[in-house]
Amino acid sequence: MKTRSFTLIAGCILASGMSFAQKTNETSAAVEFKQKYQPALMTGKIDDAKTALLNAKKYIDLASEHPDTKGTSKTLYYKGEIYGAAAQVAMMTGDTNFVIKNFGPDAFEVSIAALKESYTKDKKFRPDIENSVNMQVGMLAPMAGKFYEEEKYAEAGAAFYYIYKITTAKNVTDTSNLFNAGLCFEKANMDKEAAEAYSELAEIGYHGGEGYALAAGAYTKIKDYDKAKEILAKGRAKLGNDKTILLEQVRLNMTLGDNVAAEKSLNDAIAADPKNKQLHYIIGTIYTDLGQNEKAEEALLKALEIDPNYLEAQYNLGAHYVTWATTLRDKANDLDPNDFNYDVMLSKSQDLYKKALGPLEKYIEKQPNDANVLLILFQINQNLGNTEKAQDYKARYDKAK
């Protein structure tokens, strides 16, 4: 019995010693990180900082692998800090090989996941995580703003994205910096990165359908039309007839040359927001492209009913009347003058030229030096026999061109 008790006690001591050894790995990682890495970094001793960080990684990886310590909030906290520090070193020194070679290409993601798990597991390390995140944001936010002002949009986008991502470690969803990242990537012509940032915005539910529309627009730019359609379909499934999503769907359909699908999307959009002048204006231009002249006229008039000073609608309605009138006149001229339709078409053509004067004259009041419109007004008035007006517009055109 004594022998058996001794063996049992010895086993317990051994097991306790093994657990202690694993706890020592947590402590050793903490010592290497806080007492060696951080002071070296603060004093600019980059090589010493890298050495300490690699030692810290060795210990925290051992702690992360052992069943006794792999799930503790302490191990998770230090793993997040140590792997995140590797990404910070890379940003400071430009030495991405150091991170990829020693910590892997996903070091930053590993860091965020570990910190977030530690944060949600218990309250012990929350203040440390919050202080770490706030310190990094405080360092990076001015840098991101400076990059933006200097038009270094790729660098600004990376910094804004880092800020967004690191704040998720303390369960904060920073949509402003994620939007800024997407915007900067777009300005840097990094449309794939912009699309990915905007897609994250969409999943979060940024400003209703705006995230979905931005993401689809970015995917359209890189001609990934299937992905753009997929994003918009997700948005429609979640938000229904959101006007921002519908407008982007119209733009995508028009890019693909599918005006019929674009028209359907706009009709859905108008049903969702009947007082939106832009929707009526765009559907008017689509009907124009489809050759449905009466529907185009109706939609553009509706836009002007909502806003009588809507310049784009004034211009396009006038241009639509001119094109329509010219087409009828040309068709009439192809007929025998004795054909009944000859006079009907010419009469309708003249009526349309007269209709064009109204919106185009309102437009030119606001844009008095638009040479193209001045020329059109000269030609219409000359065609209608309004000689004095025609000469006035001709003189203004000669001056503006």
Image: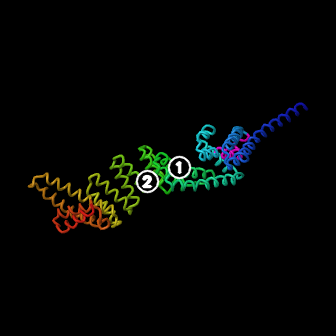
The answer to whether residue 205 is visible is: no
x and y, in percent, of residue 224 in the image: 43, 43
Q: Which mark is residue 245?
A: 2
Magenta-highlighted residues:
68-83
- Hey, what amino acid is under mark 2? Ile
Residue found at the very far front of the displayed protein = 44
Q: What amino acid type is highlighted by mark number 1?
A: Glu
Residue at image point 31% right, 56% down: 285
Give residue 56's mark: none
Which residue corresponds to the image point at 33% horizontal and 61% vertical from the top-left?
312
Position above or below: 287 against 59: below
Nearer the observer, 127 or 162: 162
Q: Nearer the viewer, residue 44 or 319?
A: 44
Residue 397 appears at what percent x and percent y?
Answer: 24, 63
Residue ranking furthest to the right: 2
Residue furthest to the left in view is: 338
* Residue 334 appears in the rendering: yes
Which quadrant holds residue 337? bottom left
Q: Residue at 64% x, 54% y: name it.
A: 135
- The residue that mark 1 highlights is 155
Judge by depth and name the residue closer to the eye, 237 or 51: 51
Q: Nearer the viewer, mark 2 or mark 1?
A: 1
Residue 168 spot, x, y in % from top left:
60, 51
Determine the secondary structure under disc 1: helix
The stretch drawn in magenta includes residue 166: no
The residue carrying pointer 2 sits among few (fewer than 14), some (14 to 19) or many (20 or more) residues within 10 Å by Cα, namely many
Q: Is 13 placed left or right of 292 in the picture?
A: right
Position of 199 with respect to 103 (left or right) is left
Label tally? 2
Q: Main secondary structure of the magenta part?
A: helix
Image quadrant in which the N terminus is located = top right
> Mark 1 Cα within 10 Å, few/some/many (few <14, many 20+)?
some
